[in-house]
Image (cartoon, coloured by chain):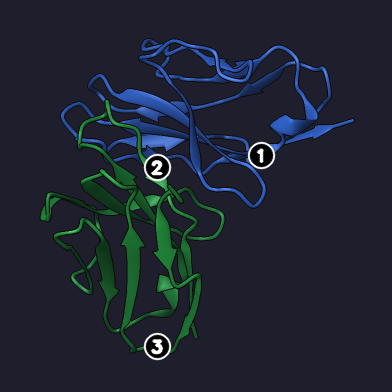
Chain colours: A blue, B green
Amino acid sequence: AQRVTQPEKLLSVFKGAPVELKCNYSYSGSPELFWYVQYSRQRLQLLLRHISRESIKGFTADLNKGETSFHLKKPFAQEEDSAMYYCALILTGGGNKLTFGTGTQLKVEL
Amino acid sequence: DAGVTQSPTHLIKTRGQHVTLRCSPISGHKSVSWYQQVLGQGPQFIFQYYEKEERGRGNFPDRFSARQFPNYSSELNVNALLLGDSALYLCASSLGVTGTYEQYFGPGTRLTVT
């Protein structure tokens, strides 16, 4: 069965430092990968998806099929980036049923 | 548009009871999905409905059921509640059922089973 692994439950960085949130997946096919974010007291929302290859709020993520990874990166963390981040995938032919990782809490300290 | 709405916000039930959770999708969205989020875990897929038909079911027991109404709103029903059913139940709506379509999540219903 497919699985999404986020090894860090909590990641704490200083403002202005680079951020990398790790995500690995196990699936033999070609999934679609996503990052979702949940800010304090807000709903879960889509941050970015790999097929769009765009940068949102300064975040980027590259799909590495060889390493089955989809790490989320930002060169300079901002205080407003503090949130819960979930990596998720959709299987090929799986409609839009999302399989989520356990999430990483990002805390940006001043 | 207020986005996806869910009711109730919070709910406390006793083991063995039944519960019904409700979801109203964004106007124009024909697909509704349900997810269970246990504390400390990511959301786990339960059901997806599109045009009132079930399009997917996650690995949940038959105590869990759902339906979608002609106005595309949806209900999630859980029978014979167990302590382990305590979780945040999320509803998400989308225009369609492929990965092209972004899912928009509601605020969730917090269910506590005592």
Instruction: Calculate the distance from the C-alpha at mark 3 to the C-alpha at mark 2.
Output: 31 Å
- Could you say whether the residue bearing mark 1 is in a helix, strand or loop? strand
| Mark 3 and mark 1: Cα distance apart in space | 33 Å
Kindly identify which residue carries mark 1: A83
Name the residue at 67% across, 48% down: A40
Percent across and percent down for residue A88 are 41, 34
Relative to B41, is A66 on the left or the right? left
Q: Which residue is mark 3?
A: B15
Residue indicated by mark 2: B104
- In the shown orientation, is residue A27 left or right of residue A56? left
Which is nearer the eye, B29 or A33? B29
Q: Which is in the foreground here, disc 3 or disc 1?
A: 1
* Amino acid under disc 1: Ala
A30 and A109: which one is in front? A109
Label 2, label 1: how many angstroms apart (C-alpha)?
A: 18 Å
Residue furthest out toward the front: B1
Tag 1, which chain?
A
Q: Amino acid at mark 3?
A: Arg
